[in-house]
Image: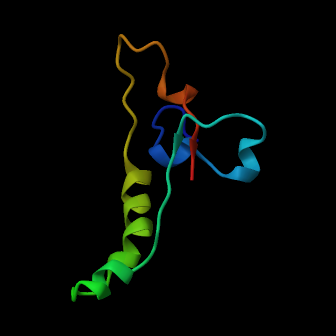
Amino acid sequence: MNSTDPRFADFIVTPDTLGDKVPDIVIIGVPTDDGIRRNGGRPGASHAPDAIRSYLAKLTPFNHPFAERTALDIRILD
């Protein structure tokens, strides 16, 4: 992690790296086109979880001046 320019991806942990700690946020992606197919739509929703993760990873977290915790204190499990 670059401490001067952290990105959202720097805060994401996996079950292997989480250990016995409890995550603050959990991201769950379901890559499926089943609902689209049932409703006669165009397939492609199955690509959404990876696309959303790639865009989220580039975001810079913001620490609100009145927040009790900083972004560095938050554990996000994917």
Q: Quadrant of residue 10?
A: top right
Look at the picture and state if 49 lies above or below 65: below
Look at the picture and state if 30 lies above or below 26: below
Side (left or right) of 65 relative to 8: left
List the single residue furthest toward the front.
38
Across and down, in percent, residue 68 comes to 46, 12
In-front residue for pair 68/45: 45
Q: How is the image coloured?
A: rainbow
State the residue at coordinates (55%, 34%): 24
Q: Quadrant of residue 42?
A: bottom left
In-front residue for pair 78/3: 78
State the residue at coordinates (40%, 77%): 46
Report the number of numbered marks.
0
Which quadrant of the rendered structure holds the N terminus? top right
Across and down, in percent, residue 54 comes to 42, 61
Q: Quadrant of residue 40?
A: bottom left
State the residue at coordinates (35%, 19%): 64
Across and down, in percent, residue 76 comes to 55, 42
Across and down, in percent, residue 11 comes to 55, 41
Side (left or right) of 71 relative to 46: right
State the residue at coordinates (36%, 29%): 62
